[in-house]
């Protein structure tokens, strides 16, 4: 009678012992790597070169509006080039089923508290929801003061470069309130699209965020941090697909979070003593440090 060899579990393979949780394992780019395939590099959207070269906003009329809508922390967040290799390493560890990074020492994830501390944007307030069936060309003319064409505006997304061109024109002294608001809308929309709501449609930003900025005299307080984290989780899940070629969302948040949680990944910086180049840095957001 032939002896049947007992099945020995593969303790070192990529598959879980129970397949009830990790339902998307075969579609994951980490599985492609294990099988000897090259899923390719991921193009990181956000923090484009044009925005990083942009002169800092110094107009107090616009900065007052930025503070009023709760996005001062985002304005203060330092602009850094995204480390593609770091992003690919963490995307490979991201599990869409649990929205966590699966690391050798356990599972971890980016929390709302991390968003508030690192980016300095509010996590309390109204949910960011709105309609997407507006006449977007009319919204461009009314709220941004921009005459658009099919190149500048595609569907519901406008070029960030066109917004920055408007900002570069500067605000004249004694500008009317509606002109100041148009200028502020252009700057805030470009900031949102480049930093936390980057998408896979090139250097464009969805205009739906303008609905939350319509009342700049007494704006309601929105939970921008919740929308930021939800958008990021969605982008991370999409990027884990073995056929994905790009990733958007608040990648600057992932980078600062990784540097904070894993200090050995953070670039070494020799900081000058406090007061050497002016007043000390503000305590918020923590990404300044």
Image (cartoon, rainbow, N blue to C red):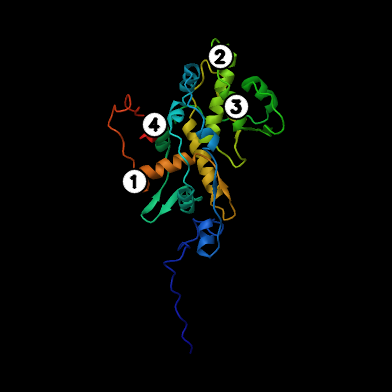
Element assignment for label 3: helix
Element assignment for label 1: helix
* Residue 91, percent from left and from top: 49, 50
Image point (61%, 40%), residue name: 202
Mark drawn on residue 157: none
Q: CA distance from mark 2 to mark 1?
A: 45 Å
Q: Residues within 10 Å of mark 4 (few under 14, many from 20)?
A: many
Contact, CB < 8 Å: mark 2 with mark 4?
Answer: no
Residue placed under numbered mark 2 in the picture: 172
**Residue 150 visible from this viewpoint:** yes
Image point (64%, 20%), residue name: 145
Image point (31%, 39%), residue name: 270
Q: CA distance from mark 3 to mark 4?
A: 27 Å
Residue placed under numbered mark 3 in the picture: 165
In the image, is residue 220 above or below residue 35?
above
Q: Quadrant of the C terminus?
A: top left
Question: Residue 166: which quarter of the image?
Answer: top right
* Mark with earlier residue (2, 1): 2
* Residue 272, percent from left and from top: 30, 33
Residue situated furthest bottom in the rendering: 1
Question: Residue 76: which quarter of the image?
Answer: top left
Element assignment for label 2: loop
Contact, CB < 8 Å: mark 1 with mark 3?
Answer: no
Element assignment for label 4: loop
Mark in the foreground, 2 or 1: 2
Residue placed under numbered mark 1 in the picture: 263
Contact, CB < 8 Å: mark 3 with mark 2?
Answer: no
């Amino acid at each position: 009678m032939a002896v049947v060899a007992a099945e020995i579990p593969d303790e070192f393979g990529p598959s879980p012992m129970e397949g009830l949780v990790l339902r998307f394992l075969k579609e994951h780019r980490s599985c492609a790597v294990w099988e000897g395939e090259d899923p390719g590099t991921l193009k990181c959207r956000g923090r484009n070169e044009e925005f990083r070269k942009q002169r800092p906003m110094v107009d107090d009329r616009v900065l007052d509006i930025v503070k009023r809508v709760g996005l001062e922390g985002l304005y203060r967040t330092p602009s850094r080039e995204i480390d593609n290799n770091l992003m690919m390493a963490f995307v490979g560890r991201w599990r869409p089923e649990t929205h966590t990074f699966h690391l050798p020492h356990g599972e971890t994830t980016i929390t709302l508290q991390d968003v508030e501390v690192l980016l300095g944007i509010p996590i309390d307030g109204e949910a960011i929801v709105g309609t997407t069936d507006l006449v977007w060309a009319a919204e461009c003319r009314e709220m941004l003061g921009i005459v658009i064409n099919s190149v500048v505006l595609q569907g519901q997304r406008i070029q960030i470069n066109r917004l920055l061109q408007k900002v570069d024109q500067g605000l004249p002294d004694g500008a009317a309130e509606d002109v100041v608001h148009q200028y502020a809308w252009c700057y805030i929309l470009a900031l949102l699209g480049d930093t936390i709501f980057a998408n896979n449609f090139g250097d464009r930003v969805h205009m739906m965020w303008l609905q939350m900025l319509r009342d700049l005299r007494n704006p309601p307080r929105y939970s921008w941090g919740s929308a930021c984290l939800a958008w990021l989780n969605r982008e991370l899940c999409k990027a884990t697909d073995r056929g994905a070629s790009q990733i958007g969302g608040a990648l600057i948040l992932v980078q600062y979070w990784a540097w904070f949680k894993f200090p050995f990944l953070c670039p070494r910086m020799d900081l000058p003593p406090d007061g050497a180049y002016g007043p000390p840095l503000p305590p918020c957001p923590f990404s300044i440090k």
